[in-house]
Image (cartoon, rainbow, N blue to C red):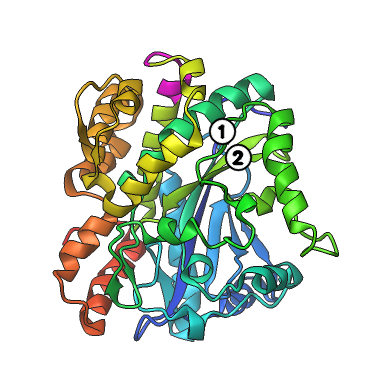
Amino acid sequence: MSYRLFEVFGIELEYMLVKATNLKITPIVDKLMILKNGSITSDVSNGKIEWSNELVAHVVELKTNGPTKQLEDLDELFHKNIKEINKLLLVEDAKLMPSASHPLMDPEKEMKLWAHHYSEIYALYNKIFDCRGHGWSNVQSMHLNLPFYGDEEFGKLHAAIRILLPIIPALSASSPIFEGKNTGFLDSRMEVYKTNQKEIPEMTGKVIPEQVFNKEDYKKQIFDPINNAIAPFDTDNILDKHFLNSRGAIARFDRNAIEIRVIDIQECPKADIAIAVLIIETLKLLVSEELVSIEDQKNWHEDELFAIFNDIIEDAENTHITNSRYLNLFDVHAECTAGELWETLYERVSDGISPKHRKSIEFILSHGSLATRIQKGIFNDYSPANINSVYSELVTCLETNNFYKP
């Protein structure tokens, strides 16, 4: 079935399984599936939410079971499933942990691939890319899927998403620590995402997608180069072009949607859905051409947008944006931080947002990204004990669907 712009949404949330006693990762998603379903399966339908495995055996994905029109209480639906999973995992002394990266994981030693359904695909990825790095085995995100109908709607949506991608990490950054160290990036997930497929650079490109605004051009400029580059490695032809495409937003022509992938997972579904709502409402504003024409949005080359994105994954909401042409797209005529830009955008779209989600968005805009709040909680003490103390609080936030406020 085809849907029009912003008619429905698809949201996917990824979480780590960790030991309850020490927060070390535990690769037992297969056991979780047995506890829920009685057997090892790659996914479990749980009413309106589906549970799925991922590339690595310690990450589970929760997603809307098909497109949904209802975002108002979606966080509560995800939270209900999180509580069910944590209850099932009690017998394994395990629970779910949020945030986009485990702060103490050593992927060289701890990474374990999913070994069941579709394992031949993951094994091939590992053979090509060596998935022991953080960019493969220690990254959790929210994926936001937005529908389009035909080339005209695709062109409008893709143009607007490309414009907004660079500043999304200012809202969502939640990965400031790898292996017990401050990485220098509030969004370390996106920093390693840029290069985790360096062996075949056609797959990620510049993260910001190229200037393509119809299906035929997308095939020629993105899918064909990917397929040609992967062919020598994928001799059995088992990899799908839609999944090989790893840009920060990918066209899913198989389901007529664009999937945004630059959003770090937050400490609770309340935060995730609020961020999704703000992104959706801002994209509606861009697509409406109230601020700037679609043609002007299309004119931006990915290199220009990538330069802004590259700054923002380092300092998130604190990044000073000096590109006046970019700011003018949003009718902002003075230099500002990325956080201030989001405050301006929120003021423009807040009338279309429910009081519940407004409250959550205002918390994030006021208190900063989760990465910033994690750093405040760490307070420059990167001892394993202190890191575990802070992330134990995040685990509680996930369990209770509450924000982290150090």
Residue range in magenta is 284-291
Q: Residues within 10 Å of mark 2 (few under 14, many from 20)?
A: some
Looking at numbered disc 2 in the image, what kind of residue is underneath it?
Pro
Q: State yes or no: residue 136 in magenta.
A: no
Residue assigned mark 2: 67
Quadrant of the image for the N terminus? top right
Residue 150 position by quadrant: top right
Q: Taking 385 as reference, is 238 left or right?
A: right
Residue assigned mark 1: 8
Residue 115's tag is none
Q: Position of residue 81 (x, y in %)?
A: 49, 60
Look at the numbered disc 2 and give the secondary structure of its residue: loop
Note whether 236 is above or below 370 in the view shown: below
Note whether 85 is above or below 66 in the view shown: below
Residue 147 position by quadrant: top right
Asked if the residue at tag 1 contacts the one at tag 2, i.e. Cβ–Cβ closer than 8 Å, the answer is yes
Q: Nearer the viewer, residue 246 or 26?
A: 246
Q: Is residue 303 visible?
A: yes
Residue that extends furthest to the left in the rendered view of this protein: 379
Q: Taking 230 as reference, is 88 left or right?
A: left
